[in-house]
Amino acid sequence: MVFEKVCQLVAEQFTVDVEDITMETLFEEDLSADSLDIVELTMALEEEFDFGEIDDEELANIKSVGDVVRFVQRKIAE
């Protein structure tokens, strides 16, 4: 469920097909994301999953869709 929601947000944010997104999809290399893209995605995640603000330290460790999925799962479990 988390993976599917994250994929939908990523697909909307980066204008790619949901089917093309995997856990290994990298934001910078595969999606050509810049810092603004990441901030916008972060805001969408915060709104979608309602777990408060993501701090910069946590954000620095997120490089792939899989990182986002694991991060969201941890936040939900807290």
Image (cartoon, rainbow, N blue to C red):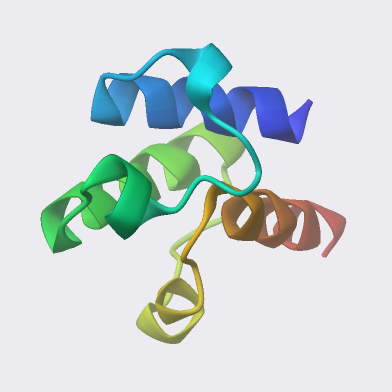
Where's the C terminus, which quadrant? bottom right
Q: Is residue 9 left or right of residue 28?
A: right
Point out the image quarter for the N terminus: top right
Q: Is residue 68 left or right of residue 29?
A: right
Picture residue at 32% right of the left edge, 55% below the top = 29
Number of labels in the image equals: 0
Corner quadrant of residue 70 = bottom right
Find the residue positioned furthest to the right.
77
- Residue 68 is situated, as x and y percent measured from the top left of the image, at 58, 54
**Snapshot quadrant of residue 71:** bottom right
Seen in the image, is 2 located left or right of residue 46? right
Task: Give residue 8's position: percent from left, percent from top.
Answer: 50, 20
Residue at left offset 66%, top offset 44%: 23
| Residue 55 position in % (x across, y down) | 42, 77
Q: Position of residue 27 (x, y in %)?
A: 37, 52
Could you say which is closer to the camera, residue 32 or residue 55? 32
Against 26, residue 25 (above or below) is above
Tell me what residue is drawn at x 43 percent, y 72 percent.
59
Front residue of this view, candidates 74 and 78: 74
